[in-house]
Amino acid sequence: MSVRQRNCIGILLFNIRFFFRKYPALPYVLKWLCISLVIGVLVGTASAGFLISLQWATDFRENHLWLIGLLPVAGMAVGLVYHYWGKEVEAGNNLLLNTINHPGKTIPFRMAPFVYIGTLITHFFGGSAGREGTALQMAGAISDQLSRPFSLNRYERKTLLMAAIAAGFGSVFGTPLAGAVFALEILFIGKIRYHAIFPVFISAVLASLMTDLWGAKHTHYHIGKIPAPDFLPVVYSIIAGVVFGICAAAFSKLLHKTGAVFSAKVTFPPFRPFIGGIVVAVAVFALGTTRYIGLGIPVITESFEHRLPIYDFALKMAFTIITLAAGFKGGEVTPLFFTGAALGSALSLFIPLPFGLLAGMGFVAVFAGATNTPLACILMGIELFGAECGIYVAIACVVSYLFSGHNSIYSQQKIGSEKNSRYRSDRDKSFSDL
């Protein structure tokens, strides 16, 4: 090698080192761009497959209603599988949150197929559950397998799992911005983990794009009439937010208390979904409708089109709480959407705001109160319904968040900052400690 060539290489290396010193974020960005790309492709593909198969299971059940009679047997089968082979992953979303807060061994990959099949069985045979929990667990189990190939340390692994949560949430609902902020908010009330902001947003966007590329469909909602911001509409929004917050707190409390009753009264875990399945199946046949099982998307859409009866939200809550507390697999979020939208639509009988607007406010506000993620829910409302309703959605989400108190559907969610001075002494506790 000539002197001139060595000088050229030396100058090139010097320029590269100077460039990286001037822009120290570049290696971080390039590294997490690569990791996020892998997460986006894998999680987006998994979410697409899940959404497509979930739609098939729902359609098949609605055309063969006799399958609902087999819900107790199906529930016990899933319970037996988890009891003998899935105890490590039975905690579900709480395992994800606990692993992020206290990284230990890698989340077993079996969590993904177990929760996927378990959720399909729940919907195929007529349980009332959602899809967010499944998407998050699949995303976490898949993405955590990347920690070794990419040689991630303990701190970086936390970021990896937060990116997985963002990708799973954003892709399953088609709301990448809300999914990203949800992942930043969900760990600690009142604290946002800004260190993960880049991989979280990139993973959520890429996963959502990947799900769309596979042709998985998301439901679209439309709010017909939105009043101009004024004093009275704002006051009415605050009143609605209070009701949504109380509803969110009631859902969380009843879910945990019903689960505790099942655990105390039925000592053999696989019998719990068997008994819960009997209750749900008998209730469905007694009511003569499948309105309150499955995801409930048609009823959610209906809530934006006309005022719903006041009992719709309560019945959906009851069906969902029994289903999930008994041990069936699936998420809580879409049932929370149903509960909030139906409650909001019914509130238009008492609150002089358009039923479509109240349905949209309830859709995200009850979820905000039950998960303590108001910023993510505000963004979700804007992504789903448009920016025109942003003021009303924001008011409802913030007020619901405040009035839901220290309650959450996730027992491992930490209290990082008090909602108000009354809770100052509870800082840094989790809901399982309260």
Image (cartoon, rainbow, N blue to C red):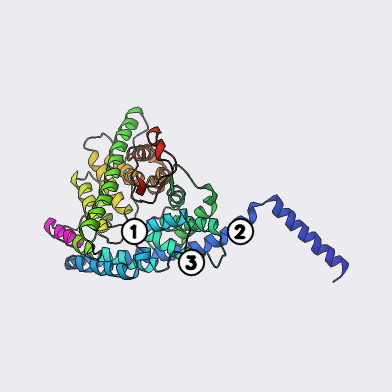
Q: Main secondary structure of the magenta part?
A: helix
> In the image, is residue 165 above or below residue 234?
below
Local packing at callout 2 (Cα closer than 10 Å; few below 14, some 14-19, many 20+) is few
Q: Nearer the N terminus, badge 2 or badge 1?
A: 2
In reply to whether residue 284 is colored magenta, the answer given is: yes
Which quadrant does the N terminus fall into?
Answer: bottom right
Residue 269 in view of the camera? yes
Pinpoint residue 100: horizontal percent, then vertical percent: 46, 55
Residue at label 3?
Answer: 145
Disc 2 is placed on an element classified as helix
Which quadrant does the C terminus fall into?
Answer: top left
Residue lying farthest left? 286
The disc at residue 131 is 1
Residue lying farthest right? 3
Amino acid type at circle 2 is Leu
Which is more toward the observer, 393 or 189? 189
Range shown magenta: 277-289
Residue 167, located in which quarter of the rendered image?
A: bottom left
Local packing at callout 1 (Cα closer than 10 Å; few below 14, some 14-19, many 20+) is many
> In the image, is residue 275 above or below residue 101?
below
Amino acid type at circle 3 is Gln
> In the image, is residue 251 above or below residue 420?
below
Residue at label 2?
Answer: 30
Residue 27, located in which quarter of the rendered image?
A: bottom right
Q: Nearer the N terminus, badge 1 or badge 3?
A: 1
Amino acid type at circle 1 is Arg
Pinpoint residue 294: horizontal percent, then vertical percent: 26, 59
Q: Residue at x 27, y 61 (%)?
A: 328
Determine whether label 3 and label 2 are within 8 Å by CB.
no
Spatial CA span between label 2 and label 1: 32 Å
Which is more toward the observer, 51 or 267? 267
Q: Which dot, 1 or 3, sits closer to the camera?
A: 3
